[in-house]
Image (tube, rainbow, N blue to C red):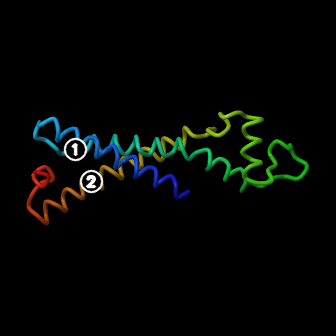
């Protein structure tokens, strides 16, 4: 499940660059991104990554779950492709997203806080090392 954080960081950095570029071109003078904006960017990035990768997590979980012999054939899987096809056939695409609400609440909040704290720490470190704020460093 390395793909989830990879997608998350790619989305976060892309969105952050777009915001900074838009601010720089608007000539408002304030290129700095607020902690709330960072929090929201982190949440959106994690949400996007989770929506994209959650079906893979469902398939992985179902393959790892104990499968009783003699049980319902709809829940016995021979491999990844078989699990994929049976989930689509018997549950529809909705089957790939069962239980995602709980995962979203837990992981999106954690990621949003993580990104906000990380960016604030970077600002503090930059200020300590250079004596300039991030807004002054960009100019």
The answer for how far apart the CA atoms under marks 1 and 2 are is 9 Å
Residue 31 on image: x %, y %: 16, 44
Residue 125 on image: x %, y %: 19, 62
Determine crowd level at label 1: few under 14, some 14-19, many 20+ residues with C-alpha closer than 10 A.
Answer: some
Query: Which mark, residue 71?
Result: none
Q: Quadrant of the N terminus?
A: bottom right
Q: Secondary structure at mark 1?
A: loop
Residue at horizontal 82 percent and vertical 42 percent from the top: 74
Residue at horizontal 36 percent and vertical 47 percent from the top: 12
Q: Nearer the viewer, residue 120 or 30?
A: 30
Q: Nearer the viewer, residue 47 or 13?
A: 13
Check if mark 1's residue and mark 2's residue have beta carbons within 8 Å: yes
Q: Secondary structure at mark 2?
A: helix
Q: Nearer the viewer, residue 65 or 82?
A: 82
Residue 82 on image: x %, y %: 77, 48
In this picture, is 106 found above or below 123? above
113 on left or right of 60: left
Residue sticking out furthest to the right: 70
- Residue of label 2: 119
Q: Nearer the viewer, residue 62 or 78?
A: 78
Residue at horizontal 57 percent and vertical 40 percent from the top: 100
- Residue of label 1: 33
Residue at horizontal 9 percent and vertical 57 percent from the top: 132
123 on left or right of 50: left
Residue sticking out furthest to the front: 25
26 on left or right of 71: left
| Quadrant of the rendered image containing residue 35 | top left
Closer to the chain start, of discs 1 and 2, is: 1
Determine crowd level at label 2: few under 14, some 14-19, many 20+ residues with C-alpha closer than 10 A.
Answer: some
Residue 99 on image: x %, y %: 61, 40
């Amino acid at each position: 499940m390395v793909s989830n954080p990879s997608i998350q960081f790619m989305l976060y950095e892309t969105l952050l660059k777009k915001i900074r570029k838009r601010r720089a071109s608007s000539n408002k003078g304030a290129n700095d991104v607020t902690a709330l904006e960072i929090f929201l960017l982190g949440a959106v990035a994690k949400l996007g990554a989770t929506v994209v990768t959650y079906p893979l997590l469902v398939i992985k979980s179902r393959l790892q779950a104990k499968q009783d012999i003699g049980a319902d054939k709809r829940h016995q899987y021979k491999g990844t492709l078989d699990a994929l096809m049976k989930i689509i056939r018997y549950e529809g695409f909705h089957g790939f997203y069962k239980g995602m609400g709980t995962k979203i609440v837990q992981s999106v909040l954690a990621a949003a806080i993580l990104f906000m704290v990380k960016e604030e720490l970077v600002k503090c470190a930059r200020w300590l090392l250079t004596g300039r704020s991030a807004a002054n460093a960009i100019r």
